[in-house]
Image (cartoon, rainbow, N blue to C red):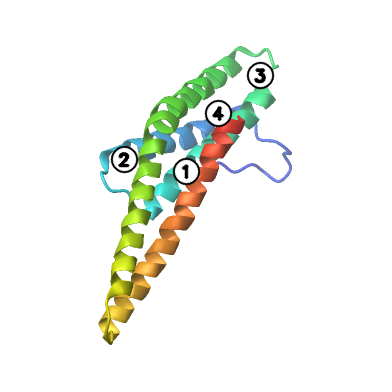
Amino acid sequence: MILVSVMDSEPSFEESYQLFQIESNQLEDTIKNTLEKSDKTISDIIQIYYQVIKVTSLGKLLKQRFQDKVEPNHHTLLDRIDNVQKTIVEKFNMSLHPTILSQLTDSVQKHTDDLKSLAKESGEKSKESIEEEAKLYKELRDLMSTKEFVEQYAIGIEDD
């Protein structure tokens, strides 16, 4: 991680460029790794959205800061930001995001159906079946929360 001294109010161009390179490379690796996984965990999903949001925000901030300056090396950073934003739109927003949302929707439905079928079972439940049902409820809550987070990201895309 790049540290800025306490005396500096803003990081230098070089520090900004290095930070964006590190974060955008990490995003590209995360997208690649996530695309390779057929079944994404909640942790995988949160990590990739966090990285997308972080790089998108950092790109916007750096663009605002360096766009109006006429120094030639700033164009290198601005071009990199544009390329990364294009990658986010093409590989994440248009491809990976809908896949993740679909996977979450399917998982929520499967967990809901499983819990409905468990609820229909009559008779006394064993300690193990009660624990399994509680585990399914917890997983369902986690999936629904993650799905809500992913849907909020989609709303943010529409607002941009």
Spatial CA span between label 1 and label 2: 13 Å
Q: Position of residue 64 (x, y in %)?
A: 68, 25
The three-letter code of the residue at mark 3 reads Gln
Mark earlier in primary sequence (4, 1) = 4
Q: Is residue 34 above or below residue 95?
A: below
For the question of whether residue 143 can be seen, the reply is: yes
Mark 3: few/some/many CA within 10 Å (<14, 14-19, 20+)? few
Q: Counting other residues with Cα less than 10 Å from the Cα at mark 4, is it few (<14), some (14-19), or many (20 or more)?
A: some
Residue placed under numbered mark 3 in the picture: 67
C-alpha separation, residue under disc 4 versus residue under disc 1: 22 Å
For residue 160, which quarter of the picture? top right
| Residue drawn at x 31%, y 40% as measured from the top left | 33
Q: Is residue 154 left or right of 11 when viewed as pictured? A: left
Question: In this rendering, which labeled residue sits more in front, label 1 or label 3?
Answer: 1
Camera sees residue 15? no
Which amino acid is tagged 4? Tyr
Q: In this view, does 110 lie above or below 115?
A: above
In front: 78, or 141?
141
- Residue 34, image x and y in percent? 33, 41
Kind of element beneath mark 4? helix
Which comes before the other along the chain, label 4 or label 3? Answer: 4
- Looking at the rendered image, the disc whose residue lies closer to the viewer, 4 or 3, is 3
**Dot 2 crowding, Cα within 10 Å, few <14, some 14–19, many 20+:** few
Q: Mark 4 points at which residue?
A: 17
Q: Name the residue under label 1.
A: 49
Residue type at mark 2? Asn
Tell me which label, 4 or 2, sits earlier in the chain: 4
User: In the image, which is nearer the foreground, mark 2 or mark 3?
Assistant: 2
